[in-house]
């Protein structure tokens, strides 16, 4: 019920406006500077942002959901 698109091309070749129509950005296996850039774009355009990677038994996950209201 949703459209999912995966793009494995180099992020450096994408302009900021490439991401403007997205509702969610999920980034894996990217550099720290690319994460910072994508998160900045996501913040400016109120896009949900997820970044994750795994290094053997170690890994990380970063989420920036912007302003989010929880229902109790």
Image: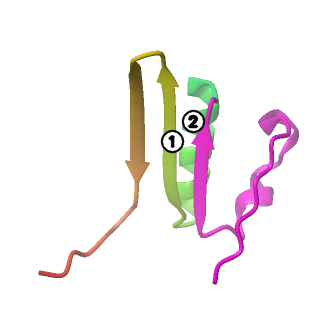
Q: Residue beneath label 2, please?
A: 35
Examine the rendering and report whether any part of residue 43 can be seen. no
Q: Is residue 48 left or right of residue 3?
A: left
Rendering coords of residue 42 (x, y %): 56, 56
- Towards the viewer: 42 or 71: 71
Total marks drawn? 2
Q: Which mark is residue 51?
A: 1
Rendering coords of residue 5 (x, y %): 76, 61
Q: Which mark is residue 71?
A: none
Res 21 quadrant in image:
bottom right
In which quadrant will I find the C terminus? bottom left
Q: Is residue 46 left or right of residue 17?
A: left
In which quadrant will I find the N terminus? bottom right
Q: Which range is magenta? A: 1-29
User: Residue at position x 71%, y 74% from top?
Assistant: 3
User: Residue at position x 47%, y 15% from top?
Assistant: 56
- 21 in magenta: yes
**SS at mark 1 in the image:** strand
User: In front: mark 2 or mark 1?
Assistant: 1
* Outermost residue, left side: 72
User: Residue at position x 64%, y 33% from top?
Assistant: 34
Residue 40, placed above or below residue 42: above
Residue 33, placed above or below residue 37: above
Res 8 quadrant in image:
top right
Q: Are marks 2 and 1 in contact (CB under 8 Å)?
A: yes
- Towards the viewer: 70 or 33: 70
Rendering coords of residue 29 (x, y %): 63, 29
């Amino acid at each position: 019920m949703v459209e999912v698109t995966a793009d494995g091309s180099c992020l450096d070749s994408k302009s900021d406006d490439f991401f403007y129509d997205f509702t969610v950005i999920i980034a894996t296996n990217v550099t720290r500077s690319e994460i910072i850039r994508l998160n900045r774009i996501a913040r400016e355009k109120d896009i949900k942002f997820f970044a994750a990677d795994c290094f053997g038994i170690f890994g990380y996950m970063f989420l920036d959901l912007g302003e989010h209201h929880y229902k109790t």
